[in-house]
Image (cartoon, rainbow, N blue to C red):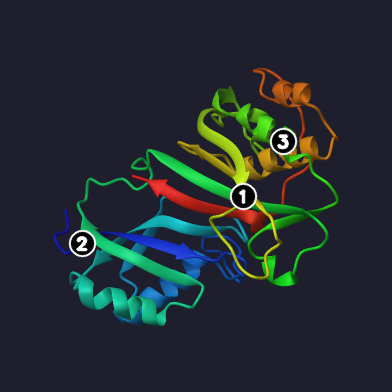
Amino acid sequence: MDSSRYFYLIQLQYLGFRYSGWQKQPDVLTVEGMVSRTLSYVFGHKNFKLLASGRTDAKVSANRAYVELFLDGDPLVIDQFLPKFNENLPPDIRALEIREIDAEFNIINAPTAKEYLYLFSFGSKAHPFAAPFMTTILGDLDVGRMKQAAKLFEGTHDFKNYAYKPNPGTKTVGTVIKSEIVVNDLYTANFFPEKSYVFRIRGKGFKRHQIRLMMGMLFDIGQGKVDMDFLKQTLEPGTTIKLEYIAPASGLILNEVIL
């Protein structure tokens, strides 16, 4: 092994509203692209690579996410690097901490669970400043029924119908540790609606758009478009039901990655 390679774990938080997701892509602004650009400036070279614990989609935010840094050359002086890194990151990305790890650490397999939040409100149109943080459904929602429905996602199920465009090899059976809807007292602002809610879901991992499809199902339940039996049917093994409603991305937050 090259003795000049060093390994670090960086904890990040970011507002995803202006980014086309985490993963670096040509000609679009992404979180990974911005982090890489900042590191290149701080290091003065590009002798490094990044690997995230998961990739968020466009407009999705993260409260506590992890990225592994593989650095060739000289080791970091962490207490000097972290302030300089934050100084040069844009205001909507912040590094919370960084620590050295060994070569055996695997950022993909290390998480034991991931928790996501989806913020929403209903009724009249919300203040435009709330748009990056939550989805507002115009009209009424039966939140009581939505709370009952959310509990049906808990446990081990085949989430094939909640996997966006799965291929034949996609593993769709997974376990949801927690699924609940509660009043939002986690994120507040004077331009938020007077009352808002959080769909909180925790599991080992989730497929692309899975949580947004689940949230879309809960919105349909709350609006009376489908019933509980239909939701139960979508979780039955062997069923193929095309779910049309993918909830907007801007209400979704990767709240925590548990290592």
Disc nearest the viewer among 1 and 3: 3
Amino acid type at image mark 3: Gly
Q: Which residue is drawn at 68% across and 70% down?
A: 191
The kind of secondary structure element at disc 3 is helix
**Separation of residues labelled 2 and 1 (CA atoms):** 38 Å
Q: Is 135 above or below relative to 189?
A: above
Say which residue label 2 marks: 5
Kindly identify which numbered label has been placed on residue 144: 3
Residue 30's spot in the image, x, y percent?
55, 67
**Residue 168: x %, y % from top left:** 61, 29
Q: In the image, is 100 to the left or to the right of 84?
A: left
The residue type indicated by label 1 comes to Tyr
| Dot 3 or dot 2, earlier in sequence | 2
User: In the rendered view, does 101 fall on the left or right side of 126?
Assistant: left
- Residue 66: quadrant of the picture: bottom left
Mark nearest the camera among 3 and 2 is 3
Above or below, 219 against 187 in this view is above
Q: In the image, which disc is placed on residue 118?
A: 1
Give 163 or 184, whichever is nearer the viewer: 184
Q: In which quarter of the image is residue 259?
A: top left
Give the structural element (helix, strand or loop) at label 1. strand
The spot of residue 74 in percent (x, y) is: 18, 72
